[in-house]
Image (cartoon, helix red, strand yellow):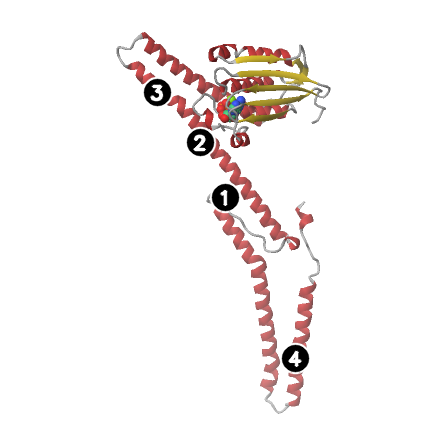
Amino acid sequence: MSVKRRTESRFPASLFALYLVTLLLMSGIHMGLVTLINENQQWPTVIQVLIPVVYWCLVAGALTMFTRRKIIKTYDQPMKALARAADRVAQGDFSVYIPPIHTTNRHDYLDLMFLDFNKMVAELGSLETMRTDFVANVSHEIKTPLAGIQNYAQLLRRPGLTKEEQEAYISAILSSTRRLSALVTNILKLNKLESQQIVPRYEPYDLCRQLSECAMRFESIWEEKGIEFDADMEDRATIYGDESLMELVWNNLLSNAFKFTQPGGTVTLKQTSDEAAVTVFVSDTGCGISQETQKHMFDKFYQGDTSHATEGNGLGLALVLRVLQLMNATIQVDSAEGRGTTFTVEIPAHRKSEGT
Ligand SMILES: Nc1ncnc2c1ncn2[C@@H]1O[C@H](COP(=O)(O)OP(=O)(O)O)[C@@H](O)[C@H]1O
Ligand SMILES: [Mg+2]
């Protein structure tokens, strides 16, 4: 690919012209000198011999200097710049950028090497930030529940606790351990999905049954929180997909809907289908999602401001998106702050064609 971008002239015409003119000039002067010597035969022989020798020495010296300057400018300086840049990258500075020497339409292979080098460094830099961000996020997510466990365990040690207090501390510890274990499970799942260790199975199954089963698991939550739950589905809708992976999608979307909706609100699960696709809408009348959060909510560990106090670790929607990509499905969000959110998932009704 890069070979095509390179302008490579086999015969540098300007250099040829320069050499031709210089050589003509030189030999012109040489002829002049010879004529001068011939006219002054009375000069000592040493001088007659020395004049052309000195002259050609000067010419050779000038050419040597010219070539050396050319080489330094064309190769030495760019190579030194590259070496300095590579050294900085080796020391962990990924902000390095080496500007190409020529303008875009006159790029030679050195320019292309610089451009590729810049691209490589940018790529390395983003990998590096991703890695450090990931480690920072995971550490933070693990530290919070661990600190909780530690606190409550210390409280449990105090003498003279009532039965209720003990119970409360124990359930706080249990909830932290559940949070930890959910975190680890999610990280592992996401990791496996991304490194393609999970090979999705595409099998026909009834989506409506799956949706009702998932929704029923939230019954205790909507009753406890005083949220109204509406379902509007067909009797049956067959899709091709991996049932256990799709379950992650509905669980995450529904859990978000219930989590971000205040008591008295409504969560609606709607499903329709046509020739081409089966569509599922998960709507709530909750707090809504700001534009800023909408931009990032599918990123790993991203949580909108609203949710830091509540449960979760920001991996839910990242998992949802990854699974839906594997299923060839799409997800859209429509949300108004303070009024609610609708997630729309569209799954192709037909089997993914082989090889795609
Ligand atoms: N139904 C929803 N209503 C309001 N905000 C939502 C909703 N779903 C997702 N969000 C926002 O998107 C963020 C990312 O969601 P998610 O990846 O499931 O993480 P988590 O639920 O662990 O916070 C949430 O922190 C929240 O700010
Ligand atoms: Mg979530």
Which residue is identified by label 1? 94
Q: Earlier in the sequence, mark 4 or mark 3?
A: 4
Picture quarter with the N terminus: top right
Which residue is identified by label 4? 30
Mark 1 vs mark 4: in front: 1
Mark 2 vs mark 4: in front: 2
Which residue is identified by label 2? 136
| Distance (Cα) linking label 4 and label 3 | 95 Å
Q: Is residue 32 above or below residue 21?
A: below
Q: Secondary structure at mark 4?
A: helix
Q: Nearer the viewer, residue 206 or 117?
A: 206
| Distance (Cα) linking label 1 and label 4 | 57 Å
The amino acid beneath tag 1 is Phe
| Distance (Cα) linking label 2 and label 4 | 76 Å
| Distance (Cα) linking label 2 and label 1 | 19 Å
**Badge 4 local density, few (<14 within 10 Å), some, or many (20+)?**
some
Identify the residue at horizontal 67%, vertical 51% (top origin): 6
**Badge 3 local density, few (<14 within 10 Å), some, or many (20+)?**
few
Picture quarter with the C terminus: top right
**Badge 2 local density, few (<14 within 10 Å), some, or many (20+)?**
few
Q: Earlier in the sequence, mark 3 or mark 1?
A: 1
Q: Earlier in the sequence, mark 2 or mark 4?
A: 4
Task: Provide residue 171's location: percent of width, then percent of height.
Answer: 39, 13
Task: Provide residue 130's location: percent of width, then percent of height.
Answer: 50, 34
Which residue is identified by label 3? 150
Identify the residue at horizontal 29%, vertical 10% (top origin): 161
242 left or right of 226 in image? right
**Is there CB contact under 8 Å for labels 1 and 4?**
no
Identify the residue at horizontal 36%, vertical 12% (top origin): 168
99 left or right of 201 in image? left
The amino acid beneath tag 4 is His
